[in-house]
Image: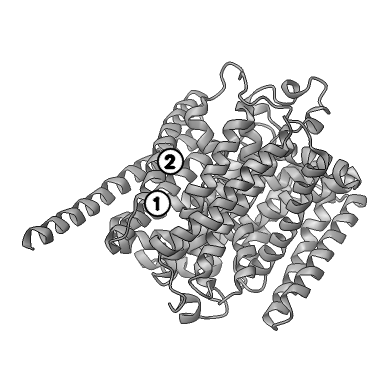
Amino acid sequence: MSSIFIVIFGLIGFSFGWFVYSKFIAEKIYQLDPNYETPAHRFEDGVDYVPTNKFVLWGSHFTAVAGAAPIVGPAIAVYWGWAPALLWVTFGSIFFAGVHDFGALWASNRHDAKSIGALSETIIGTRVRSVMMIIIFLLLVLVNAMFATIIGDEMVIYPESVFPAWAAIPVAIAVGVLIRKKFNLLLISIIGVGILYFTIYIGSIMPLALPGDIFGLGERGNWIILLYVYAGIASMLPVWLLLQPRDYINGAQLVVGLIVLYSAVLFTMPDVAAPMFNDVAEGTPPIWPILFVTIACGALSGFHGIVSSGTSAKQLNNEKDARFVGYLGALGEGSLALITIVAVTGSLYAATAAGGWDELYPNFTGGPSAGGFISGGALLISNGWGISLAFAQTMLAVMVVLFAGTTMDAGLRLTRYIIQEWGNIYGINPLKNNYISTMVAVGACLLLAFGVSNGNYPGDGGTLIWPVFGATNQILAGMTLIILSVYLLKLGRPARYLIAPMIFILLMAIWASVWYIMDYISKGQWILVLIQVAVMVSALFIILESWGVVSKLKAEDKAVVSSD
């Protein structure tokens, strides 16, 4: 079967989501008000609260939530077959991720741009906020540790990506300054993207590596340390100077990359080499429920709710922009996951392996993850556009590195916010300081990255974290949907469009958590056991607290009806 049918199926679904379903949610459920004064205007400070053009904010939001996860997750999950991955990416983006991301942005905007953790206190109760912040903190540390490992790996495997990845920083700063000075956005975007692609060309002919063993941790470990130094500095800069323009220009680059990839599929019409449903090897994790936590970003992700409420809500210029930024951002990530499925299952890529698909994916953990996307996508681009394979590989490697990097920027900034909120709640004055809270955030991430080891090199703990990240991520998504559902019920609006996906994802995530806890115990990975147990216990507490609030609302409604 031709891969074009996978693309058509996904894009038709996404079109329905944007033109029909998201419009219904915006008008009938969230009821967006263009005259509502957003927190970006009410608290404008030029640092965190900055009213932002919706296209710039979409680019910033999109790349902050995307990262490498919508590439890595689908690339692993296709081991079960391309059909399950395709169905979850398509329907998950439309009915789960879209309403989740959009809803978190809208609800935060209605509550002074509070984070989803602080929002839980307002909507459900004080005790829930304390527990919710634990889940959020653990997820952020997992994300940062995991993506640092991914970036370090890619920079070693693809040294051609090093120059363009770091060159993107001064380009982003220049773009941020020019946008601040009200220069023409389209012209800035074209020039910025053009410069980025020129640096990719330079990188493809000038691979770079670290000059020596700087910290005595090997090349990958050294990159991880340097990435945290950069991310720590970046997380303290004003959002308009680096975070926002870096995310925006990377988003523009991704749009160009997606157009090139999707058109390459149209030009080459590659067959699908992978089976629709794979006859998996013995010992493979069960597709139910593990599929739904393996593909998190690209179908549904609790991390998106943190970004929507933690940073994007502080930059929302008009409430009506929430649909464009939140829902369309989720569909953009779904489109990246969709093309990843095509890239790693197309016969052009499978043909490069001596034994075909079975040689390429011998078992569940043997899939090439981000490398599969880079190799498969590069072959698509090279055959479809006549571009050199070296340039195409560099282009996609840079895409992976930059998106993982922008997620680290946002993730570390959000971790700092959580630590500072703890400082405010418990009166711990040092934690309120930007520098101290950032160092604590970086220290926690490094502790996990280097404290959990896969035995390959210092800092490789991120390679083990994906399962616990996926389960924690989906539990947080379920918690966010609970908060949004209770908020809608308090407003007297229908909540079933959030309750249905909430019930489904919580069942899958808790089931998967139990499965992985047993697996971690058998392997003696006690740090991951403790994290997963802490998240599960916290989630069960929030579910019970939320049920109490809903029961009280129902009792009050009955009392009103009886008095009438």
Q: Is residue 389 above or below residue 103?
A: above
Residue 82 seen: yes
Residue topped by disc 2: 505
The amino acid type of the residue labelled 2 equals Ile
Is residue 452 visible in the rendered image? The answer is no
Please determine whether, in this image, residue 385 is positioned above or below residue 529.
Answer: below
Q: Residue at x 52, y 40 (%)?
A: 470
Find disc 1 in the rendering and name its residue. Answer: 481
Q: Is residue 423 left or right of residue 487?
A: right
Extreme residue in the left direction: 563
* Quadrant, the C terminus: bottom left
Quarter of the image where the N terminus is located = top right
Judged from the image, the secondary structure of the residue bearing numbered disc 1 is: helix
**Callouts 2 and 1 close, C-beta under 8 Å:** yes
Q: Amino acid at mark 1?
A: Leu
Given residues 444 and 294, the one toward you in this image is: 294
Is 132 positioned to the left or the right of 16 in the image? left
Of residues 77 and 32, the one drawn nearer to the viewer in this rendering:
32
Q: Position of residue 464 (x, y in %)?
A: 59, 35
Residue 219 horizontal/vertical position (percent): 77, 44
For the residues marked 2 and 1, what is the alpha-carbon distance in whole angstroms? 10 Å
Relative image position of residue 204 (x, y in whole percent): 89, 50
Which secondary structure lies at badge 2? helix
Local crowd at mark 1 within 10 Å, few (<14), some, or many (≥20)? many
How many labels were placed on the picture? 2
- Indicate which disc, 2 or 1, sits on the residue closer to the N terminus: 1
**Crowd tier of the residue under label 2, counting other residues whose Cα lies within 10 Å: few below 14, some 14–19, many 20 or above:** many
